[in-house]
Amino acid sequence: MPGRSPQASACEPYREWIEAGVRQGRTAMSIWQDLVDDHGFASSYASVKRFVVKLRAEAPREAHPVIETAPGEEGQVDYGDGPMVRDPSTGKYRRTRLFVFTLGYSRKCVRLLVWKSSSQVWAELHEKTFRRLGGAPSVVVLDNLKEGVLKPDVYDAALNPLYRDVLAHYGVTALPCRVRHPDRKGKVESGVRHAQQKLHGMRFESLEEAQAYLDRWEARWADTRIHGTTKRQVAVMYAEEKPHLLPLPVEPFRYYQHGERTVHLDGAIEVEGAYYHAPPGWLGHRVAVQWDGLRVRMLDPRTGELLREHVRQERGKRRMREEDRPKRTPATTLTLLTRSEGAGSHVGRVCQAIHRQDGEPGVRRILGVLSLCKQHGPARVDDACAAALALELPTYAFVKRYLERKVSLPLTLKQVDPLIRELTHYRDLIDRRTEEPSHESD
């Protein structure tokens, strides 16, 4: 109504609490939810949103000084949304990802387009960038995205192993930003926005076409522009910075897959169907594993120390160093053999035969026989093991097939049976048949 004085906001009694939340960078939605849960706030989210917008408008802006770096000292990296490109697999337009790497001194950028990201794609993009630049900076500043950082920590961040090793191959150190502190890499974010403004609304028929357009724009316009902060041409400053970049290694990085495995009772881990033995003392423990087309490496997950390196094997094959072979039967194996004897005398004899033939690698097969006892019952498995011993095939594979096919024991031949007549009956029948023609001739 005209002349009516405006009412105070329902948020006014909670001003200090809301101001503290705004200073912490919290959203209006999270502040409203806590007001409802903890303070019995009865007004709507819109009321809190208007109040937070007003507080942010009144808050004094903080100055963000320009971070100056020496030539070759630092590069900043980030992802952004790329242009729409037709996906060859679906025929529909799809949003790409824009990878941007910016040198801190010259503001020279390398921009690359990909369909999707992963730890290996992220590492490969860095390697392509270093090759395009003709060298690598000493430090890379990045956000805490999962492709690069597994566990954010401003003092001791846990890097993705593959990314860490790629940077080490080129002599580069990673420097993750503080969580929710993007201003530390403002140069690369400016480079992302610069490319997005150029690509806004554009569509391409292939990823190669989009990358070619981006490279042409980079060389013709982005590199030749006068930068707004340095007031100098980017290409000229890059020419000054390039000699200070770290030299590239002779060979590119050899990529691998990585994960964690548990060392099983036979002392081995499994990688893509093959078995690789760990050194003594790691039974039942988790180890970090790296593998490629040639090698499998086991590392201490705490220290990164190399425990064992093996040549890749075919599926079902096994690799063990001679010094890792046990000098005697481990206590865990003796326990399994004792359990097998308790399941049945024939079961115990088959498991003993498996251990004599295969050694410690046969522990898995012994476990398989014991699992068959749980599945089919000890009596049936003991009968199957008796058949295996009779046929001299004391293996897990035979016992399993025997049980699956429900093979019955072979019947023995009988000398006497109600269905079998006396031999004299057959003799008399033959005599009568042979005498009948002679009587007819008389």
Image (cartoon, rainbow, N blue to C red):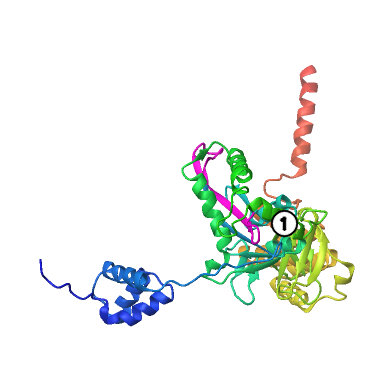
Residue at the farthest top position: 441
Type of residue at label 1? Answer: Glu
Q: Is residue 104 magenta?
A: yes
Image quadrant assignment for residue 49: bottom left
Image x and y of residue 140, in percent: 66, 64
Left or right, 3 with respect to 148, comes to left
Q: Is residue 117 visible?
A: no
Left or right, 338 with respect to 205, comes to right
Q: Is residue 62 magenta?
A: no
Q: Is residue 184 visible?
A: yes
Left or right, 200 with respect to 153, comes to left
Residue at point 59% right, 43% down? Answer: 217
Image x and y of residue 152, in percent: 58, 71
Split into 4 quadrants, where in the image is the N terminus? bottom left
Image x and y of residue 66, in percent: 57, 67
Q: Nearer the viewer, residue 320 or 402?
A: 320
Q: Nearer the viewer, residue 281 or 148?
A: 148
Query: What residue range appears in magenta?
Result: 83-108
Image quadrant assignment for residue 13: bottom left
Image x and y of residue 401, in percent: 70, 54
Left or right, 271 with respect to 179, comes to right
Split into 4 quadrants, where in the image is the C terminus? top right
Query: Badge 1, how many Cα within 10 Å: few under 14, some, many 20+?
Result: some
Element carrying mark 1: helix
Instruction: Check disc 1 and report the residue beneath it.
Output: 240
Residue at the farthest front position: 231
From this view, report whether residue 220 is shown above or below residue 322.
above
